[in-house]
Image (cartoon, coloured by chain):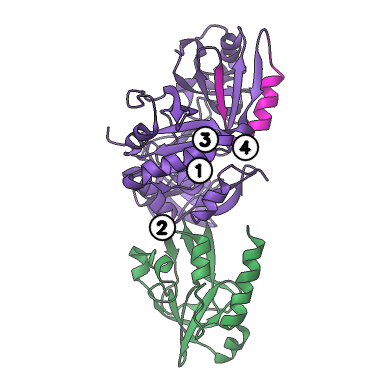
Amino acid sequence: MNIPSALRYSNSHEWIRVEGNEGSVGITDYAQGELGDIVFLDLPDVGAKVTAGEPFGSVEAVKAASDLFAPVSGTVSAVNSSLGQQPEQINQDAFGKGWIIKINLSSTDELGNLLDATSYGKLIEQSHGDHH
Amino acid sequence: MNHVALEDQHIALGGKMVPFAGFNMPVQYSSIIEEHLHVRNTVGIFDVSHMGEFIVTGSDAEKWLNRMTLNDVSTLTVGQVQYSAMLYDSGGVVDDLLVYRFNDHYLVVVNASNIDKDFEWLSSHLGGDVAIRNISENTTLLAIQGPRAAELVRNIADVPTDGVEYYHFIEGHVKGIPVIFSRTGYTGEDGFEIYIDRAHSLTLWNAVWEAGKPLDLKPIGLGARDSLRLEVCYCLYGNDIDQTTTPHEAGIGWITKMKKAGGFTGYDVVLKAKENPTRKLMGFILTEKGIARQHADVLLDGQKIGEVTSGGFSPILNKAIGLAFINKPFDVLGTEIALDVRGRQVKALISQTPFYQRSK
């Protein structure tokens, strides 16, 4: 399982890569694998406010839909518009081309509530055990 | 949990296993969209051994089956298959099924989720010289579907399968083991479904793969099975038809032979529903982003006019599609409707079905 060590993770399977005051957000490789083929996204506009732990959009896969939760609070500073035409980039490259939004963080303190790669790895090991 | 004979083979191929109708089944191997397109363009193999099979014997078998099912069993010739359904006295659907006519018996193939219910229903309505036997647990069923299916099956069969017409079957052998080659399927493509004794599952599986490798055969899960059937608008029991639906409103009036001798169980209710329909199963295509799934409300000017029975993504159209019961008199092609997708209203058009038809 691919879990880059430089990123922070939420319990709801989002990742964030922070550079300065801005964080790129996406869903993890594990999450895209569980969802399967992603065909549509419902995303906020640039400038929208997001709150840690609250939904900021949703992702629709062939099998099921899922909300996207903001790992941190802040303002949306960019949206990956290429996902409109090619949502499958999330399936192909969840931590790279499949980034979803960028957030200007209200406070870097909230990063402390997120998981590091080791803890996230343990989380998905456990939730995978709950599956089949 | 029930286990198909080839479960280890599916896991070895990377099948993601999920519980379905009491069986541990592969829902996908790589990607539902890739698998779907592979069946449309090339050839795929499905393990559908969860389906149920009953053998019906006795001198009154034809007469009895004719009363228990909607279609006209008396028109079947040996070697022919018939799509049909059986109803409760209330006119609701017990199950949809296939009837195979052999020389001295019939084979009835039913949905996995309904095996016990169907067997009890049929057993409790036996009449005359008829016996019914449930061979579901001893039967493996593999579907080979796609434009290259006929070539693959030709290469493993000891009988001429090319001449077998759609909805017909031929008995033969694979590696010396008796099988039934049935030119049927649930995908809208050409193909065969092959029945074999469970004990010989691996022999058939290996023979199919040996012949299939050069043809780029791929394993296909239940996810693509569902999206393939939805594009061609084949009914799914539990979604589009169930104990609350009557045949004509669900678009299976064509298998409902109102004039056949002796009628059928549920006839009176069906006649009334046919003459005074209240709703109709219609297709829709979304014109905005989203996928409407089963039970989503169908709205017209904010009023509920129906409910989605099946919804999903069409890899061929690259759009979300589905089927919905639309109340009369709103069942008009081209009507713009809204679908409640997780609290959001998404626009769609009532559209012609099927959404896809293969070029012959």
| C-alpha separation, residue under disc 4 versus residue under disc 1 | 17 Å
| C-alpha separation, residue under disc 2 versus residue under disc 4 | 32 Å
Q: Chain of mark 1?
A: B
Residue B299 shows which numbered tag?
Answer: none
In this figure, which residue is indicated by the disc labeled 1? Answer: B310
The disc, 4 or 3, on the residue closer to the chain's N-terminal end is: 4
Q: Residue furthest front?
A: B176
- Nearest to the observer: residue B345 or residue B179: B179
Q: Chain of mark 2?
A: B
Q: Position of residue A25 (x, y in %)?
A: 47, 78
Residue in the picture at 44% in, 42% down: B45
In this figure, which residue is indicated by the disc labeled 4? Answer: B113
| C-alpha separation, residue under disc 4 versus residue under disc 3 | 16 Å
Residue B256, compared with residue A20, is above or below; it is: above
Nearer mark to the viewer, of 1 and 3:
3
Q: Which chain identifier belongs to the green chain?
A: A
| C-alpha separation, residue under disc 1 versus residue under disc 2 | 17 Å
| Quadrant in which residue A123 is drawn | bottom right
Q: Are marks 4 and 3 on the same chain?
A: yes
**Residue B301 in view of the camera:** no
Is A123 covered by the magenta stretch? no
Tag 1, which secondary structure?
Answer: strand
The disc, 3 or 2, on the residue closer to the chain's N-terminal end is: 3
Q: Are marks 2 and 4 on the same chain?
A: yes
| Quadrant in which residue A73 is drawn | bottom right
In this figure, which residue is indicated by the disc labeled 3? Answer: B141
Residue B289 shows which numbered tag?
Answer: 2
- Nearest to the observer: residue B198 or residue B268: B198
Q: Quadrant of the image for the C terminus of chain B?
A: top left
Please report the bounds of the magenta region as a residue range.
Answer: B106-127
